[in-house]
Image (cartoon, grey):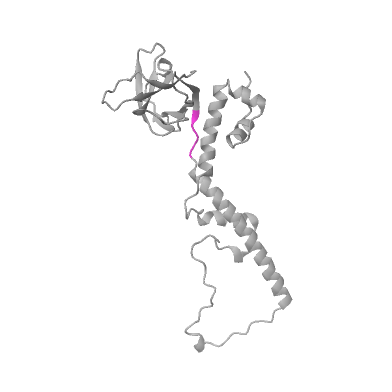
Amino acid sequence: MQHLHDDALALLALGEEPTAEETAHLAHCEQCAGEISAYGRVVKAGRSPVEAGSVPPPAVWAGIHEALGLDPSLRRDPLEDQQADRTPRQDTDSSSRPAETAPPVSLADERRKRRGTKWFAAAAAAVVVAGAATWGIVRGFEPQPEVLASVSLEPLPSYSDEGTATVDLLPDGERELVITSSSSDADGYREVWLISPDITSMVSLGEMEGTEARLKIPDGLDLSAYPIVDISDEPHDGNPEHSGKSILRGQLEL
């Protein structure tokens, strides 16, 4: 099977409508669907509001200033909280010093210089503001996880939910199961399990609150021995065993 190109996966994660061919492919390709899900989490993080007051350090503006070869008068970082006081300071000792006579200047030249300086300042400020937004987003990014496996979760009889399960390998080497579901309804509470193919052994990963959960996979657990992902409806009876009432289920292809 030929998979979708990375560019197509990225565009779909950004919200572009898939073509008929892409829709048909994604309906049967869990790998591409899992990669879109992973890209989607990056997009979600990038579109999250940036913290108030999150601005690049002065070194960023210094680099922009040097790269653009801007006038020395624009060296000051325009995003600093404190703006320079434009009011000339009165020198308390000025009366005791002789006044210095400034050389005459051309008013036309001065006007041209001021217009040029203002244009540069406006352009440079636009550059650094755009850079600040990018800085805030990039700073919020972390190294992206590697998708090890992904599967669509199918509803069991009497349920109509839909869901996905993705196994991510995190940058620190930990494995994480990312679960999504179209609903969070349950008579009790939802619990996520990994189950053996013969349904004789299972491991609980924890409760699922809401429609998405990220649960750590225990170190050393062989996923090929527990490839079935199961979401159950558990009563509040203190019994740690599976209730036998499954809502969604799917088997990872490892």
The percent position of residue 170, horizontal first and vertical second, equals 45, 31
* Total marks in image: 0
The percent position of residue 109, horizontal first and vertical second, equals 72, 74
The image quarter containing residue 86 is bottom right
- Which of 155/202 is in front? 155
- Which of 153/167 is in front? 153
Residue 13 versus residue 222 in the image, above or below: below
- Which of 74/238 is in front? 238
Report whether 184 appears left or right of 88: left
Report whether 218 appears left or right of 33: left
Determine the residue positioned at 61% across, 55% down: 127
The percent position of residue 135, horizontal first and vertical second, equals 53, 49
Q: Which residues are magenta?
A: 142-146
Residue 68 versus residue 8 in the image, above or below: below
In the rendered image, residue 252 lying in the magenta stretch gets the answer: no
Report whether 168 appears left or right of 107: left
In the rendered image, residue 145 lying in the magenta stretch gets the answer: yes
Residue 70 is at least partly visible in this image: no
Report whether 19 appears left or right of 36: right
Determine the residue positioned at 53% across, 31% down: 37
